[in-house]
């Protein structure tokens, strides 16, 4: 009767998954009736002869937990030695991943606390930052032969390609019937320089931003990740043009200045000497711009909402305003001017090219924080999201002060490239008129 009860209990344990890979015989031997020792007959019985062939089971008992840990299909492809290596790698990576997540959670918490203190007008202290850099993986790497098998059994998730210029143009035409007016690089630079000088930006500020953002060779239709000369590569962000505005920037600038853009286009259409064809073109563009503005204002006027909207078909179409010979220079110059104005409002009226680029890279408020005496000492991980930190090699493993120095050094290199030289010359020509 007791044997039947023990067998029934074992079946329940097996059904619940508690016994796992242990054999029924092993667990049964461990079970005792309540209040007494195990039956003497159990250990004294010799295993029946037919059980001897099954005495080679220990290797299966060792392999089963590994198969459960890494998956039966992968375990079948790996040798026992490879399984050991793979499990050691997994253990090390798991430990690192936990440390990595903990670090970035602390960074986010500190950033939220600084945001709250800023709203209350309180000064920051060193305790408001994480003084350490993000952890680095120090464990074993996965050998190429094992990595290949793992990728075959567990293919990494396919990355969805980012929208490219062709996608922006297609959506502009589909959503708004808009095709940007194209021009030459010299003419686009001339319009850009003219607008920049009108609003108080200097040649040094604008050309240095261009040099850093485009490598000194950028075209006005350049997208981040695409070589402007060979046209090879793939997009790594939505950034377009000389100032590399993101699609959410385009939405934000349109919301702020769209009405003024439309009025200016209409005024240009009515200016003396404007041909009928050009006047019609400008009026049509003003009407389209108003449609874009109406759509952009259908979402809250805040960065997060603009980011979400910018990924929609209308948002992608609006981004092509950067490529338009009439509107593109205005939009990008006003974005840079807003950085200059924000700095002036915080007591920094004179920005170097590297400082205005820092604000362009990190955002106005964050860039200004990085320029404070305390902010300059801190690792740049305090000022970027985890994804932004990972995507921008130039910011990694540096303090804010070191990043500024690096920006200056790279600008000096790219100022010697053909595009930067041409841009500087055009600024001089415009200034002399």
Image (cartoon, helix red, strand yellow):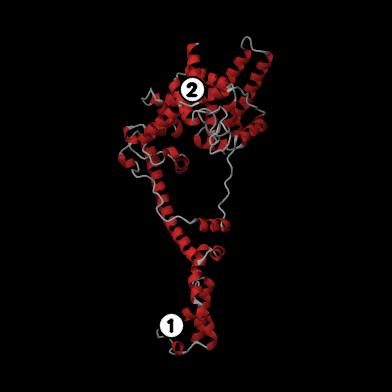
Q: In this view of the protein, which residue sits in the foreground, 199 or 288?
A: 199
Residue 353, picture quadrant: top left
Instruction: Note whether 283 is above or below 358 in the view shown.
Output: above
Please tell me the numbered disc located at residue 241. none
Q: In this view of the protein, which residue sits in the foreground, 393 or 142?
A: 142
- Determine whether, in the image, residue 347 is placed left or right of residue 289: left
Within 10 Å of disc 1 (Cα), the crowding (few <14, some 14-19, many 20+) is some
Residue at the (45%, 58%) spot, across then down? 89
Residue at the (52%, 30%) spot, across then down? 252
Task: Report x, y in % for residue 230.
Answer: 57, 33
Q: Is residue 364 visible?
A: no
Q: In this view of the protein, which residue sits in the foreground, 13 or 167?
A: 167
Question: Mark 1 sits on what residue?
Answer: 32
Please tell me the numbered disc located at residue 421. 2
Within 10 Å of disc 2 (Cα), the crowding (few <14, some 14-19, many 20+) is some
Residue at the (55%, 86%) spot, across then down? 50
Q: Along the polypeptide, which appears first: circle 2 or circle 1?
A: 1
Query: In the current view of this chain or complex, which residue is farthest to the top?
Result: 272
Task: Report x, y in % for residue 315.
Answer: 59, 34
Task: Report x, y in % for residue 401.
Answer: 35, 34
Instruction: Note whether 155 is above or below 108 in the view shown.
Output: below
Residue 92, picture quadrant: bottom left
Q: Is residue 310 visible?
A: yes
- Could you say whether the residue bearing mark 2 is in a helix, strand or loop? helix
């Amino acid at each position: 009767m007791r044997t039947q009860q023990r067998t029934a209990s074992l079946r329940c344990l097996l059904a619940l998954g508690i016994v796992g890979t242990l054999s029924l015989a092993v667990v049964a031997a461990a079970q005792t009736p309540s209040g007494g020792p195990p039956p003497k007959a159990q250990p004294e019985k010799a295993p029946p002869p037919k059980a001897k062939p099954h005495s080679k089971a220990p290797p299966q008992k060792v392999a089963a937990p590994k198969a459960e840990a890494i998956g039966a299909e992968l375990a079948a492809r790996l040798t026992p030695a490879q399984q050991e290596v793979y499990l050691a790698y997994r253990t090390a990576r798991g430990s690192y991943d936990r440390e990595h997540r903990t670090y970035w959670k602390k960074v986010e918490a500190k950033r939220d606390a600084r945001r709250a203190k800023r709203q209350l007008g309180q000064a920051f202290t060193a305790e408001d930052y994480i003084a350490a850099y993000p952890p680095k993986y120090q464990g074993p790497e996965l050998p190429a032969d094992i990595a290949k098998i793992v990728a075959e059994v567990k293919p990494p998730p396919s990355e969805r390609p980012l929208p490219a210029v062709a996608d922006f143009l297609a959506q502009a035409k589909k959503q708004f019937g808009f095709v940007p007016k194209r021009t030459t690089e010299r003419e686009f630079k001339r319009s850009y320089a003219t607008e920049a000088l009108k609003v108080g930006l200097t040649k040094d500020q604008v050309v240095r931003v261009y040099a850093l953002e485009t490598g000194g060779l950028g075209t006005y239709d350049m997208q981040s990740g695409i070589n402007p000369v060979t046209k090879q590569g793939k997009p790594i962000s939505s950034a377009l043009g000389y100032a590399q505005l993101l699609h959410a920037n385009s939405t934000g600038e349109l919301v702020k200045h769209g009405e003024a853009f439309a009025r200016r286009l209409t005024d240009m259409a009515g200016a003396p000497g404007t041909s009928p064809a050009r006047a019609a073109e400008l009026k049509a563009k003003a009407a389209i711009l108003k449609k874009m503005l109406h759509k952009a204002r259908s979402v809250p006027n805040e960065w997060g909402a603009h980011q979400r909207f910018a990924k929609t078909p209308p948002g992608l179409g609006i981004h092509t305003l950067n490529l338009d010979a009439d509107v593109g220079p205005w939009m990008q110059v006003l974005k840079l001017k807003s950085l200059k104005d924000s700095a002036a409002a915080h007591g920094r009226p004179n920005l170097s090219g590297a400082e205005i680029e820092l604000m362009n890279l990190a955002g106005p408020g964050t860039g200004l924080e990085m320029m404070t005496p305390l902010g300059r000492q801190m690792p740049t991980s305090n000022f970027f999201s985890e994804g932004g930190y990972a995507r921008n090699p130039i910011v990694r493993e540096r303090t804010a002060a070191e990043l500024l120095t690096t920006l200056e050094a790279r600008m000096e290199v790219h100022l010697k490239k053909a595009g930067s030289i041409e841009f500087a010359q055009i600024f001089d020509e415009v200034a002399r008129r």
